[in-house]
Image (cartoon, helix red, strand yellow):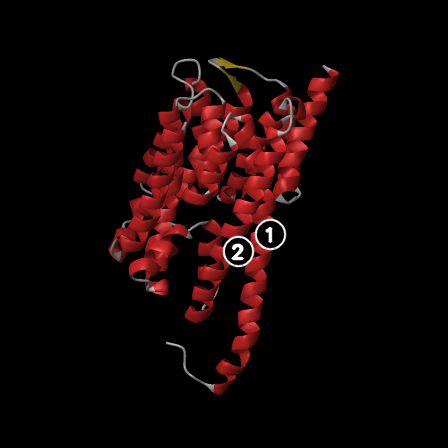
Amino acid sequence: MWGAVLLASAGCYALKLAGMSVPQRVLADARVRRIGALLPVALLSALVATQTFASGHDLTVDARAAGLGVAAAAVAVRAPFLAVVAAAATTTALVRAVS
Amino acid sequence: MVPDVPEQRDIWPAVRAAVVRDAAGIGVATGAYALSFGAIAQTAGFSVAQTCVLSLAMFTGASQFALVGVVGTGGAASAGVATAVLLGTRNALYGVRLSPLLRARGLRRLSAAHLVIDESTAMATAREDPRAGRLGFWATGLAVFICWNIGTVVGAAGASALADPRSLGLDAAAPAAFLALVAPRLMHRETALVAAVAAAAALASVPFVAAGVPVLIAALVAVAAGLRPPVRSR
């Protein structure tokens, strides 16, 4: 695990430093800008989906889905980050406790 | 080029105070969010020391959540690293925008680069006066760095004291965190569509590929969408 921690940290820092060091015209390419904007959207949505509905190689709907539903409602009413996360965890724990 | 009029000099102390106050507020808010990172990393099987090194050395929230999230759900460490680094590419784009504003060289550039994150970039580019922008960058970056690392230690130590984090529903905390991170980016129809297709592609590939890889397949959706000409001009 230490290897992953250090490698990913080095990779992320290298990207930050590279951005500060490359010439401005890199950003002039519209495709670079678009991919840069869309990449976090695609990765984060995929993480939401897989961490809620995947269990090993199976797709399941379990207590985590209830937690995500409540999190979505909390996001919709612009609740602060910690409230969104806490609401999801509490809901999931409650659903598990009663089922 | 800001004209050096007396009025401008008079308002600087007020501007400076406002920037520092905003930076402190953002720092405290992200510190609270670091509590959940610390707790989630514990649930995923990372030690307190590894969790703290991630916050000190990686210092970019979404990538940190992604690494522990992928590994915690059984994904290979390499898939976790790849996802974390791909999420970190946006910091490179931020850096391109920030470097003419900060004009940092040498050691100063090395430390400025470490503080290039969503919050510091937003604060640096939110103000027209370059001096206020630079202050916004450094004040926000440092405030978030301090609070983020304190929050991580507290969250990690707190969760490691729990017998079974799953009974508290902490495995649902990670997807909720990702949802809160992506939600502000879904305002445009095109990004919402990319999000939906990416999520569907990831889920569809779950039965067929190793854990962690579905998220990398979703990255291809973003690349494909970005290479296509825009659907409409605005």
Residue denoted by label 1: B28
Above or below residue A79? Residue B222 is above
Q: Seen from this angle, which residue lies furthest bottom?
A: B6
In-image side of B23 versus B97 (left or right) = right
**Alpha-carbon span between mark 2 and mark 1:** 8 Å
Give the residue at x 54% y 65%.
Answer: B19
Pick whichever, A72 or A86, lies toward us: A86
Above or below residue B48? Residue B25 is below
Residue denoted by label 2: B143
Q: Is residue A25 visible?
A: yes
Q: Where is the N terminus of chain B found, in terms of image quarters?
A: bottom left
Q: Position of residue B164 (x, y in %)?
A: 63, 22
Q: Is residue B218 visible?
A: no
**Quadrant of the image occupied by residue A86:** top right
Question: Dot 1: within a 10 Å radius of its alpha carbon, few (fewer than 14), some, or many (20 or more) residues?
Answer: some
Identified by mark 1, the residue type is Val
How many marks on residues? 2
Q: Seen from this angle, which residue lies furthest right?
A: A98
Q: Chain of mark 1?
A: B
Pick whichever, B165 or A63, lies toward us: B165
Give the residue at x 42% y 23%.
Answer: B212
SS class, disc 1: helix
Q: Position of residue A77 (x, y in %)?
A: 67, 43
Question: Dot 2: within a 10 Å radius of its alpha carbon, few (fewer than 14), some, or many (20 or more) residues?
Answer: many
Q: Position of residue B186 (x, y in %)?
A: 51, 41
Q: Which dot marks residue A62?
A: none
Identified by mark 2, the residue type is Ala
SS class, disc 2: helix
Give the residue at x 44% y 50%.
Answer: B117
